[in-house]
Amino acid sequence: MNSNLPSVAKPDILLVDDNPKNLRLLQMMLNDAGYKVRTILNGKLALRAVEIVKPDLILLDINMPGMDGYEVCQKLKSQEQTVDIPIIFISALNDIYDKVKAFEIGGVDYITKPFEVQEVLVRVKNQLLICQQKKQLQEKNEQLQLLERAIAASSNGIVITDAKKPDNPVIYVNPGFEQITGYRKEEIMGKNCRFLQGDDFTQPALEELRQAIKQKRACDVRLRNYRQDGTLFWNDFSISPVRDSLGTLTHYIGIQRDITALKQAEEALRKSEAQFRDKAQELELTLDELKSAQAQLVQKAKMASLGQLLAGVAHEINNPVGFIYSNIEPAIGYVQDLLELIALYQKSEPLTSGEIKNKIQDIELDFIQEDFPKLLASIQEGASRIMKIVLSLRHFSHHNEANKKSVDLHQEIETNLMILGNHLKAKSHRGAIEVIREYGELPLVECYPSELNQVFMNILSNAVDALEEKMLENYSLTPQIRISTEVVKADEGDPEIGRRGDTGTRRRGDEEMGETKETIPNSQITKDKQQTTNNKVIIRITDNGTGIPLQLKQRVFDPFFTTKPVGKGTGLGLSIS
Ligand SMILES: Cc1cc2nc3c(=O)[nH]c(=O)nc-3n(C[C@H](O)[C@H](O)[C@H](O)COP(=O)(O)O)c2cc1C
């Protein structure tokens, strides 16, 4: 069998000749060569045989009785199903006219009788090969047409450049490319695609693309490109190299995907996400503010009723203490007189009555004479202190109003220290807390005194708590609270704020009576008491207690933040102001 022909099925050859001798000879020869052969003696039967099984090739005699070879050929070439069957004429006619006619009516070859066996075999083989290649070509063509349609139908841009020529000129673009870029095929052919970049040729993605082209490899990048009308489009772009059978680079295929709409949608989504986030944050803030306002209202209401109570109590105590205090001075005078009288009497009249003598001994008159004035002096001191406390309470409650007022901050601080006095005194487990005042010259400051007093009170009582805690670990510590004040220019901050061991919110310890140790320099207030506008007053209250852990420092102004047990602290000490 012929090695160049498909081995799966033997090619089917139809032999048509009215000479049985010729037929036999040809049949034998072709069978030997590996072909399947059918033999037919006239034209009519030949047409019938083709109708039954379509042969791969026909060897056709011209001179036959009835229907000659030309007529058979014409009939077969006139029908769609049989037009492609290759027909080789085999005839004794050697005239050029016959040969030309044979080719004109569709014959593919012409063999003259008497024929050479080898010649017939070669010509048959050639025609079968040509026929096979024709079929393959046709199939390839159909495939190509299909691909061409697919490329044309793609909404992506497809561009092919000739990599063998300098600067990669474009040799093909599909309609998708024209659609995306707005350029027509004719304008682009032979050019390099960089014209799509306009003046935007420094974008980082281009460097990657240049490297890929230099290294003759594939690459995916996202480029900013410009249409013919100058508008920007985002080009999600890839190139892949095409190589020949020797591996030499011949072409590049570039695919352009216009992702402008996607980019815009992404951007819009990003913006709306950011807006939602902002809104959520705003809502959270508003909620916090509401909570804080509510808490402040509650606190204010509490303080208002506490203030009223304090004012009432102070008023009630004030009068009786006033009686005691104002009567004590004359009482001391009277007692002094009486004691002097008794002394005179004892000197001038010697004691005769045993009853009086006994009484003097019983009551220890000597001791009374010595101790009574001291006792009265200490009553006077006590009454004086009660008066001061009452005064402070009245002062404290007096501020319980919502309006701004000009106040002397030192006086406010002192009032708070006075109220806290008992907590500052020495206890069984620790010495007195020393209050060091470093007061600067302050003007009257316009503020909400009630809120400010709460802040002072909270900071100072927290300082006491912090010192109590520290003293548990270190008994030898001298507990100190340092209060300093100064005026600074409005645009100056306090460089030390946030650095010192400021007081935080803490648990309160047990209390016992004791002495208060204080260093009290004169409070200095500017003489004219004028308010200094555009200046700031800095009040620093520090203690040498446990300090505030770093991670809690930034939270001291957060409303409701407290380290105290539930019910002990409001967490509003600083935020309230
Ligand atoms: C097949 C192919 C298609 C290309 N298509 C584009 C394109 O659509 N847009 C673009 O900005 N550059 C495209 N380029 C890249 C440019 O042609 C050029 O290679 C790039 O600008 C880097 O070279 P340059 O620095 O000389 O300009 C393509 C390149 C090739 C090989």
Image (spheres, rainbow, N blue to C red):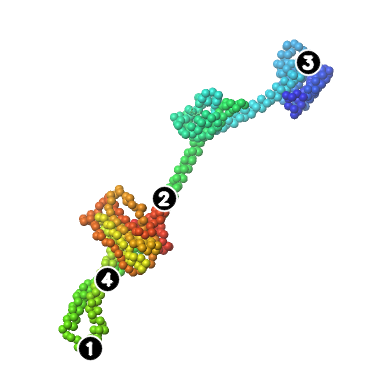
- Dot 3 corresponds to which residue? 116
- Single out the mark in the foreground, 2 or 4: 4
Name the amino acid type tagged 2: Glu
Q: Secondary structure at mark 3?
A: loop
- Nearer the observer, 214 or 351: 351
| Front: mark 1 or 3 | 1
Find residue 354 and name its label: 1
The tag earlier along the polypeptide, 4 or 3, is 3
Left/right of residue 228 with respect to residue 474 in the rendered view: right
Distance from the alpha carbon under mark 4 to that under mark 3: 154 Å
Q: How far apart are labels 2 and 4 at the CA level?
A: 56 Å
Q: Is residue 483 above or below residue 139?
A: below
Ligand 1 within 8 Å of disc 2? The answer is no
Q: Amino acid at mark 4?
A: Gly
Quadrant the C terminus occupies:
bottom left
- Residue 454 seen by the camera: no
Q: Name which residue lies at 27% across and 57% down.
A: 439
Is there CB contact under 8 Å for labels 2 and 1? Answer: no
Sort mark 2 into few (<14), some (14-19) or many (20+) by Cα contacts within 10 Å.
Answer: few
Q: Quadrant of residue 250?
A: top right
- Mark 1 Cα-neighbour bin, 10 Å: few <14, some 14–19, many ≥20: few
Is mark 2 in CB contact (under 8 Å) with mark 4? no
Q: Secondary structure at mark 4?
A: helix
- Label 2 vs 4, first from the N-terminus: 2
Q: Quadrant of the N terminus?
A: top right
Q: Earlier in the sequence, mark 1 or mark 3?
A: 3
The amino acid marked with disc number 3 is Glu
Can you tell which mark lies on residue 382?
A: 4
